[in-house]
């Protein structure tokens, strides 16, 4: 279950949806408007998030309202955001790559 939840959080649109839900439940149409995405895309992403336990859904008249399933998810996102500054960027500089290459060559020469 944890792996499924983390996998569901591994998509930029789903992270944006989670951020949009941080201040409370919202209908699909409002989320689509806030994120400037087609409603069909938002519905598809919410379905994935619901299946993995990241969001919950409740019916109110003819609307489906979505909210974050557990407050701990927001705490997790905040923690990951803080840790992100300590991660190595995906596009390392050429100098870093050259140092790693040189180190690797020296090890192979021994």
Image: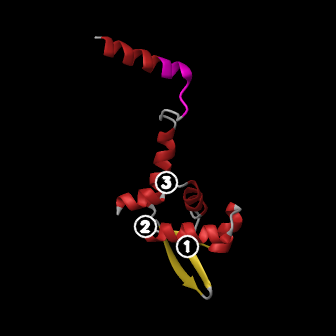
Q: Is residue 94 magenta?
A: yes
**Disc with the residue nearer the chain's start (1 vs 2):** 2
Task: Calculate the distance from the C-alpha at mark 3 to the C-alpha at mark 1.
Answer: 19 Å
Task: Calculate the distance from the C-alpha at mark 3 to the C-alpha at mark 2.
Answer: 12 Å
Task: Calculate the distance from the C-alpha at mark 1 to the C-alpha at mark 2.
Answer: 14 Å
Q: Which residue is mark 3?
A: 10
> In this picture, is 40 found above or below 35?
below
The residue positioned 56% from the left and 24% from the top of the image is 93
Q: Is residue 8 left or right of residue 60?
A: left
Give coordinates of residue 7: x percent, y percent: 44, 57
The residue stretch that appears in magenta: 91-98
Give the main secondary structure of the magenta stretch: helix
Q: Which residue is mark 2?
A: 52
Q: Judging from the image, what secondary structure is the residue with disc 3 in?
A: loop
Q: Nearer the viewer, mark 1 or mark 2?
A: 2
Assign the N terminus to one quadrant of the image.
bottom left
Q: Nearer the viewer, residue 76 or 7?
A: 7
Q: Which residue is mark 1?
A: 66
> In this picture, is 88 found above or below 24?
above
Tell me the quarter of the picture where residue 51 sits: bottom left
Q: Nearer the viewer, residue 85 or 52?
A: 52
**Disc with the residue nearer the chain's start (3 vs 2):** 3
Mark 1 Cα shell of 10 Å, populated few (<14), some (14-19), many (≥20): many
């Amino acid at each position: 279950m944890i792996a499924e939840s983390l996998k569901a959080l591994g998509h930029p649109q789903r992270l944006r949806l989670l951020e949009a839900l941080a201040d409370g439940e919202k209908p699909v149409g409002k989320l689509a408007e806030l994120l400037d995405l087609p409603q069909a895309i938002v519905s598809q992403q919410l379905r994935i998030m619901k299946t993995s336990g990241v969001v919950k859904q409740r019916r109110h008249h003819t609307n489906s309202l979505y909210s974050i399933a557990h407050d701990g998810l927001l705490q997790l996102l905040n923690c990951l955001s803080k840790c992100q500054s300590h991660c190595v960027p995906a596009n390392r500089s050429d100098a870093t790559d050259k140092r790693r290459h040189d180190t690797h060559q020296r090890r192979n020469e021994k």
